[in-house]
Image (cartoon, helix red, strand yellow):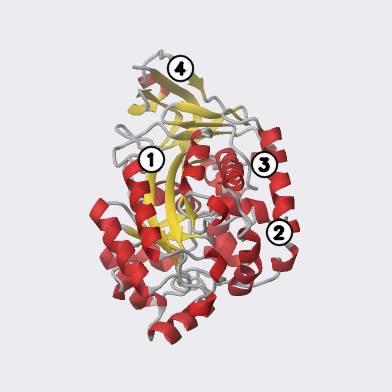
């Protein structure tokens, strides 16, 4: 049994309502036992972290991403395209992905996330060309040390059958279900503190059949795992669903059994008041991806309305080809500012609310009650940011400053009481050779080799 003592924080924000000057916590074997002022905590531990002049927060939770897209950032032909044209441009490039590409992009994405304060991330991998498997991502992620919710995505509705993706990147539906079942049985850990969980995640209404959506929900509920898909992201998607199914995206999701506390949607930009009420009533969650929505011109998600209705909301950086980054503090800041642009008669979204979306909100969306807050019984997943950074010079409210001031990287990050980032340096990976492999893979994909 190992113990960890965090003490002397300039402020420790638990995200369950407490903000403790000169705060800290004591953890045993990765689980928090006591939180409070430093002088009320044990005096010693196996590992003592002195958080003097640091802001201490729970680790951030990323609820939507596509790790492989780090290989196709700022692609010139797609730089100024909306979603459907952006996808059509990039699908042929992604069709060249290899297992090595999946591994390299996974580690680059997770490294970037970790340095921005993320300790748990979901990822949605939905195409598997050239022998690629979700196993490649899961194994690569273990070296970084973040918690992973690996979403086994899929596309089965090719262009010849009325879908958006080219036929070369779609899969047979029976094979999709069989592989998803294999992954759940091999990797899914339902226990508190789990490092790896599997999610069932058909890509979107315009890339899988109705039967695939129904079958996916049945499989997930048989095994007690969560469901995830893109939904209501753009007006083009809304038009597609009305034309193909005779109903808007959210009504279609309800029609195929995709509503409930085990479901969360990526984006949810174009959802009306009745849809918001239905999501709240069923416990359905949403991953808000403000940077991607701005980048692709998709619109502004009704975050304030979601929160007022009681919908579970987390943040997602989305794919690094539509962001084009994997920075959780930046995402929280954009969520804050974009909601304020759209606030209308509602009060401005508060800086602390943006941090709640990034922490306890994301944990709730992923169905986890063991992370997202710093409290007894929760996992010791936390980040520390030096308040002496130039970005915080003159800051009065240090907690609000995390989202109001310019985005920064974190100085320290721990997952289950184990250090992942120390003094601003990632511990689990040797970044220079990883980035060189990643650059070579990106060049090859763009060259068509």
Closer to the N terminus: mark 2 or mark 3?
Answer: 2
Closer to the N terminus: mark 2 or mark 4?
Answer: 4
State the residue position of label 3: 391
Closer to viewer: mark 4 or mark 1: 4
Closer to the N terminus: mark 4 or mark 1?
Answer: 4
Report how far apart the C-alphas of labels 4 and 3 lie in the structure: 29 Å
The spot of residue 291 in percent (x, y) is 59, 60
State the residue position of label 1: 373
Report how far apart the C-alphas of labels 1 and 2 lie in the structure: 35 Å
Report how far apart the C-alphas of labels 2 and 3 lie in the structure: 26 Å
- Answer above or below: position of 391 versus 25: below
Give me the residue at 40% from left, 13% from top.
Answer: 43
State the residue position of label 2: 74
Report how far apart the C-alphas of labels 4 and 1 lie in the structure: 21 Å
The spot of residue 350 in percent (x, y) is 48, 55
Front residue (pair 38, 160): 160
Closer to viewer: mark 2 or mark 3: 2
Report how far apart the C-alphas of labels 3 and 1 lie in the structure: 25 Å
Q: In which quarter of the image is the N terminus?
A: top left
> Mark 2–mark 4 contact, CB under 8 Å?
no
Closer to viewer: mark 4 or mark 3: 4
The spot of residue 427 in percent (x, y) is 58, 28
Numbered badge on residue 47 = 4
Front residue (pair 149, 294): 149
């Amino acid at each position: 049994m190992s113990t960890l003592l965090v003490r002397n924080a300039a402020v420790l924000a638990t995200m369950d309502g407490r903000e403790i000057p000169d705060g800290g916590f004591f953890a045993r074997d990765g689980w928090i036992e006591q939180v409070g002022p430093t002088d009320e905590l044990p005096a010693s531990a196996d590992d003592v972290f002195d958080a003097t002049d640091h802001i201490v927060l729970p680790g951030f939770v990323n609820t939507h991403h596509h790790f492989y897209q780090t290989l196709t950032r700022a692609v010139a032909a797609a730089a100024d395209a909306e979603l459907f044209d952006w996808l059509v441009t990039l699908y042929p490039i992604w069709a060249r992905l290899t297992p090595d590409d999946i591994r390299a992009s996974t580690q680059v994405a997770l490294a970037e996330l970790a340095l921005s304060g993320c300790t748990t991330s979901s990822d949605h991998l939905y195409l598997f060309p050239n022998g690629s498997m979700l196993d490649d991502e899961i194994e690569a992620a273990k070296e970084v040390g973040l918690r992973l919710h690996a979403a086994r995505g899929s596309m089965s509705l090719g262009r010849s059958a009325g879908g958006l993706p080219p036929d070369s990147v779609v899969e047979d539906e029976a094979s999709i279900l069989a592989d998803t079942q294999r992954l759940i049985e091999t990797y899914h850990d339902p226990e508190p503190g789990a490092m790896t969980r599997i999610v069932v995640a058909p890509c979107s209404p315009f890339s899988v059949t109705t039967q695939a959506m129904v079958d996916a929900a049945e499989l997930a509920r048989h095994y007690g795992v969560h469901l995830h898909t893109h939904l209501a992201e753009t007006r083009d998607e809304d038009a597609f669903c009305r034309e193909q199914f005779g109903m808007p995206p959210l009504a279609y999701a309800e029609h195929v059994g995709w509503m409930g506390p085990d479901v969360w949607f990526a984006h949810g930009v174009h959802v009306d008041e009745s849809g918001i009420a239905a999501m709240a009533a069923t416990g359905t969650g949403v991953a808000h991806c403000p940077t991607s929505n701005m980048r692709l011109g998709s619109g502004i998600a009704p975050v304030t309305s979601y929160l007022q209705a009681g919908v579970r909301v987390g943040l997602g950086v989305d794919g690094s080809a539509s962001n084009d980054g994997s920075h959780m503090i930046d995402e929280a800041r954009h969520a804050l500012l974009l909601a304020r642009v759209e606030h209308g008669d509602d009060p401005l979204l508060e800086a602390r609310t943006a941090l709640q979306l990034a922490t306890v909100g994301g944990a709730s969306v992923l169905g986890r009650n063991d992370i997202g807050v710093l409290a007894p019984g929760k996992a010791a997943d936390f980040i520390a940011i030096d308040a002496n950074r130039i970005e915080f010079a003159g800051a009065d409210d240090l907690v609000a400053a995390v989202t109001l001031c310019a985005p920064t990287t974190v100085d320290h990050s721990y997952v289950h009481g184990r250090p992942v980032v120390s003094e601003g340096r990632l511990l689990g990976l040797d970044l220079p050779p990883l980035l060189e492999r990643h650059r070579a893979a990106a060049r090859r994909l763009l060259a068509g080799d």
